[in-house]
Image (cartoon, coloured by chain):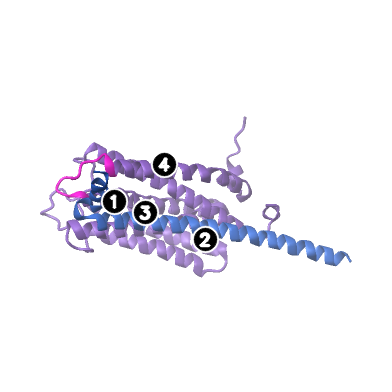
Amino acid sequence: MGVKIMSEFFYMGGYGYHVWGIMLLALVIMLVESLSLKRQQKALLQRIQRNKRIQKNKEKFLQI
Amino acid sequence: MSVSWFKYAAPMNFYPLAGKLIPLFWILAIALIGFGLYWGFFQTPDVLSDQKQYYRIIFVHVAASWMGMWLYAMMVFWGLVGLVFNTRLSFMMAQATSVTGALMAFIALASGAVWGKVSWGTWWDWDPRLTMSLILMFLYIGYIALHSAIDNSRRADKASAVLSLVGLAIVPVIYYSVNCPNPNECGSLHQESSFKGVESNILLAMLVTALGFWMYSFATILMRVRNIILERDMNTKWVSKL
């Protein structure tokens, strides 16, 4: 019984591709956008840490 | 207790505040969209007026279309505030809003095309509302292109703010470009999108999903504005302390 309901659900009265296609498109766009923002943030924070290290080494070098 | 309104106008103060708000908006977005779609797929009739089950595209289509229009108005607002008060953070907010707005406009057009293919029999038609929504997406892309074309970020902000101001006229045109009470008179396919005649469960699911899209937009815009703050203030003291 459960299987019949499930397949009927995805069949969506013959319009499964249309409805689920759009739902998938929206989901993919939202996921790609948020994950790329997360990755961009990590890269920026790494760049900041790198700048700090370079700054520290430069100061150490100048003191000698 | 005196409230200093401009405290959060400084990127340095706004950065941690946005950081605290982002998880909250993410939780709200996932909860609302999840509930809205659950309600829309399981608690609603299989038919909306003469449309069969494919009407369920309405949940994503309406939410994305509203966001497309609202985010453009928000982008123009932040651009205007930036031009008037010359506050950098306002321009950053406008720039952060543009990308999410463009994606929402694209989702609205794509879902509309698929829905149109089924109910009207065509992917596209030079109908007033469809054409204006397409122009809205081009305006977003124009904003992003102009902003990234100019190296100096301050000049880029000002130029793109003025461009978005010019495009503001299109949002009311989209909204009102469907009101033709008698379909026989005007040849527009996209009828008036009114709530009359929409079954209450469908309406509830639609509104909750739209609210979820709002929360999603806030979350991504705040994330992007934080990245822009880091990028632009890379060499300042407070950023180096992060």
Residue type at the position of mark 3: Gly
Label 4 to label 1, Cα distance in Å?
A: 28 Å
Residue B104 is left or right of residue B230, and the answer is: left
Residue drawn 48% across the image and 48% down it? B219
Residue drawn 69% across the image and 62% down it? A50
Asked if the stretch drawn in magenta spans residue B132, the answer is: no
Seen from this angle, which residue lies furthest right?
A64
Give the percent coordinates (x, y) of residue B221. 48, 52
User: Earlier along the polypeptide chain: callout 4 or callout 1?
Assistant: 4
Q: Which residue is mark 2?
A: B157
Residue B129, visible in the rendered structure: no
Helix, strand or loop at disc 3? helix
Check chain identity for marks 2 and 1: say if they share one.
yes
Subunit that carries the residue with mark 2: B
User: Earlier along the polypeptide chain: callout 3 or callout 1?
Assistant: 3
Label 2 to label 3, Cα distance in Å?
A: 21 Å
Q: Are marks 4 and 1 in contact (CB under 8 Å)?
A: no
Categorize mark 2 by other alpha carbons within 10 Å: few (<14), some (14-19), many (20+): many
**Circle on res. B31:** 4
- The residue closer to the viewer here, B70 or B5, is B70
Helix, strand or loop at disc 4? helix
Residue type at the position of mark 2: Asp
Q: Which residue is mark 3?
A: B68
The chain coloured blue carries which letter? A
Q: Are marks 3 and 1 in contact (CB under 8 Å)?
A: no
Residue B46, visible in the rendered structure: yes
Residue drawn 69% across the image and 59% down it? A49
Residue type at the position of mark 1: Tyr
What are the residue bounds of the magenta stretch?
A: B41-53
Residue drawn 40% across the image and 58% down it? A29
Which hue belongs to chain B? purple
Of badges 3 and 4, the one in the foreground is: 4
